[in-house]
Amino acid sequence: MEFFDYTIKEELPSRLNGGKTIINTLNPHSFCIAKKDPLFKKSLVSADYLIPDGVGIVLAVKILFGKKIRKVSGSDLHAHILDVANRYSLRVFYLGASENTLLKIKEKVNLSHPNIKVGWFSPPYKNEFDPDDNRLMREKINDFNADVLFVGMTAPKQEKWIYENIQDLHVVFASGIGAVFDFYAGTVKRPSQFWIRMGLEWLPRLFREPKRLWKRNFHSTPEFLFDIVKEKISPISRFN
């Protein structure tokens, strides 16, 4: 598991001559899912970078390793990559979400980052994709000649899709950023900076989507805190 002081602005240009960079995000809920889902765990651990998208991860690193790191949200990651892509006139592809959301993303990117060429595809809403689905998605991405791939299918689906398909993609960079698609498009409002600075971004989201997020906050969070306590008392490197 690798946490880092975010330097993607320098990382991406260095990869333009070959190779692929995968960045995944980690929060307490995804940590708990990964303990029970071997493929998801492999998808996270094999990434080039795993960034702390949650105050729980920041707290865990402080308690277990005595290191102070900062939260880097999927929205932060997306914003940085767009800045780099605009500077180098890259081609950015969005995979996931609805056609309406993707069109709003394209319009917004065109206004704020005019040097970027935007491609997109809205895959069918399924729990699992069949081989024809995966082949079509790979073709859409490669035919667009994408440099950057953002996948918005929510965890763990998006991370596993990248892991299982990356070798057949010609992209330089890939990342699963889930809810960022809707936040950026404006189809779902992200909590204000007040809640973000307080480390309580999850609270307004819970009130807005209780059916979807209750398990994350009332099951995974206590489980994660319990794991921190167990690891502090008797370290056994549960995740590595």
Image (cartoon, rainbow, N blue to C red):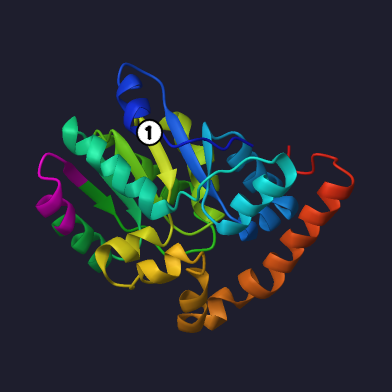
Whether residue 234 sits left or right of residue 23 in the image: it is right
Query: On the image, which quarter does residue 43 sit in?
Result: top right
Q: Is residue 144 visible?
A: no
Residue 201 horizontal/vertical position (percent): 47, 68
Left or right side of 67 for 76:
left
Q: Nearer the viewer, residue 228 or 74?
A: 228
Q: Which residues are magenta?
A: 108-118
Image coordinates for residue 104, horizontal then vertical, percent: 20, 63
Please say whether residue 197 is one of the residues in the magenta stretch. Answer: no
Quadrant of the snapshot with the N terminus: top right
Residue 7 lies left or right of residue 229; in this view the side is left
Residue at figure coordinates x 48%, y 46% from the top left: 131
Q: Residue at x 26, y 51 (%)?
A: 120
Relative to 84, residue 222 above or below: below
The residue at 32%/58% (across/down) is: 122
Residue 152, quarter of the rendered image: bottom left
Quarter of the figure that contains the C terminus: top right
What amino acid type should be assigned to the residue bearing mark 1? Ile
The residue lying at 65 percent from left, 39 percent from top is: 42
Q: Which residue is mark 1?
A: 8
Q: Position of residue 174 (x, y in %)?
A: 40, 39
Examine the rendered structure and indicate whether residue 158 appears above or below residue 223.
Answer: above
Front-lying residue, 134 or 181: 181
| Rendered location of residue 26, percent (x, y) | 57, 50
Q: Residue furthest top?
A: 17
Side (left or right) of 77 relative to 165: left
Few, some or many residues within 10 Å of mark 1 (<14, 14–19, 20+): some
- Residue 117 seen in render: yes
Question: Which structural element holds mark 1?
Answer: helix
